[in-house]
Image (cartoon, coloured by chain):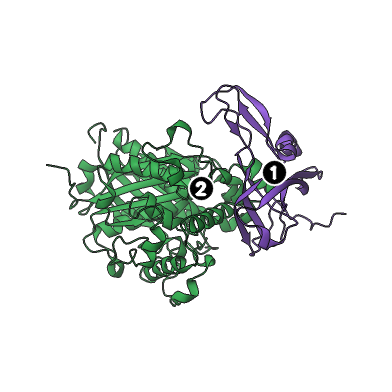
Amino acid sequence: MSEFQEQIYRHTTASATRSWRERRGRYLLEGTRCKKCGAIHFPRRTVCSTCNSRELEPCRHPATGVILEANICWQATGVHFGYGENIPRISTVIQLDDGVCVLAEVTETPVEQIVPGARVEMVLRKLHREGNSTWMYGYKFVVVS
Amino acid sequence: MSEFKHKVAIVGIGSTARPGNIHPTKTWKDLVADAAYEAIEDAKGMSPRDIDGAVIAYHGEGVNEQGGIGGSVADLLGIAPAPVFPHCMNCAGGAVALNTGWDMVASGKYKRVLVMGFDKEGDNINYTENINISFDTEYDYVFGFRHRDGFELMSNYYMQHYGYTDYKAYGAHSWQCHWYGRRNPKATTYGKPMPARESLEHPGSCYSIMGEGCAAAVLVPAEDARLYTDKPVYLDGIALATTSHYIAHRIGEPPMGPAFPAGLVREETYGQSVALIAAARKAYEMARITAKDIDLAQVYDLCAGAFWQVEDLGIAEFGKGAQFFIDGGAAVDGRCPINTYGGNIAYGHASGADGLNQVVENVIQLRGDAGERQVKDAKCAVASCVGSAYAHLTVAVLTNGKFQRGEEV
């Protein structure tokens, strides 16, 4: 049995197929690079947002970066994917070392260290159960000194 | 606006009271019918069967657990077989519906268009969860993020970027909304005691009161307006700009590509909503106004959003929006009254209705019917609404018969 609470009925239980499809993005921070103009994207794109080219190739972004902005929310606002009723809810925008920005949770770090400018490194963590009860994993970040 | 066939006027408005409350005895259909029929009755001499086209907005099908509502709405209102176009554009939906309504009338294809926006979240099992599926879910929702996280991150960024170290501006802005809400009989906070200003100087004072409701407006070609009202209000400009839903794109990496608005230095727009600047430019150009012409404005007030919205609308300089509220600029006798209906903070926030509630208030103000909260001599009013965390941005410019354009000879 998991240490997470049982999930209540959700209208929006995600299918395992759906999370499987995005596994490389979630596990490896894999986005896309435009073969035509060189722009890099995360999350992966289907059309280049800079030059509209459809010739994109997978691009693995670095697993290290810096916190651009952070928010610590002490209010429990119901059941959320990945968070459950755990507080605080920590949301950050992280700029990876190649410049792309990622919305991510910072975990296993004292809240006073979760501030703009802090160096972070990606870790893989368990998120929540999928529709067929398998566990979904994905990136979170920890502050490194 | 010679390139359009018709100038567009708003001749009827309606809205359900207390959109910050759940209305357990009413279905979404009751709420829609209440507002729609109020709007039709407000256009004197108009009957429901006169409506030859309609638009309806709601937050998203996931939120209301009700899909494909076009036919149901036509049947509900007794206007079938008139077309009803549904929109799901989050909180901006009502204003997007107005945009479509404008297109329908301006093109000459329709003569009397009913525009509606509503939300009925209380019927929903697990609303909190469902509201979050109405953004680009693969990389935010599945990680446990909400729209609100986006607003909070952007607000933190704004405050730090422009050097605001306390929450005085939140207090001033929230208090001002409450002041207006106590003077608007339809507001959720109407009749409630006023909070002390000091008690609002914290980041939690600028949140919406979420609830249910509907707002509606009737649009006709300007030349027909006098048939239905003595005080027509003209929808001179309206624009919708869109951008990525992904919250990390808001900070550091505006994904506007080559369409980045001309004349703006990218670094100077950090802390701003670039898409809102684009929408405002378009709407002002269409209405042939400048920011100086604006007598009052309604903005989407969640967290610090109102601060950079008054900046993007040109009412304050970049970085001076928070100070604008501290200085009392948003008061009824201030430099440019903001959120005179009470805003999401005190009026209440029924997501799909929101963009139209702003416009309904602007019509009331431009008609001179706002009572205690009336802005003196109001001639030009602007409304800006936000869908998701700044993915859909609308700006609507309304004027009344007294408005005169500076550059006109």
Residue B381 versus residue B203 in the image, above or below: above
Q: Determine the chain carrying the residue at label 1.
A: A
Work out which quarter of the rendered image holds the N terminus of chain B and state it.
top left
Which of B64 and A104 lies nearest the eye of the viewer? A104
> SS at mark 2?
helix
Relative horizontal placement of residue B43, taking residue B339 as reference (left or right):
left
Q: Amino acid at mark 2?
A: Asn
From the image, tell me which residue sits under label 1.
Answer: A64
Q: Chain of mark 2?
A: B
Task: In the picture, one chain is green; tell me its letter.
Answer: B
- Element under label 1? strand
Q: Using the rendered view, name the quadrant where residue B288 is placed.
A: top left
Q: Position of residue B195 (x, y in %)?
A: 46, 76
Front position in the image: A79 or A12: A79
The residue to which callout 2 is attached is B90
Please give left or right for residue B340 compared with residue A39 in the image.
left
Disc 1 crowd, CA 10 A, few/some/many (<14, 14-19, 20+): some
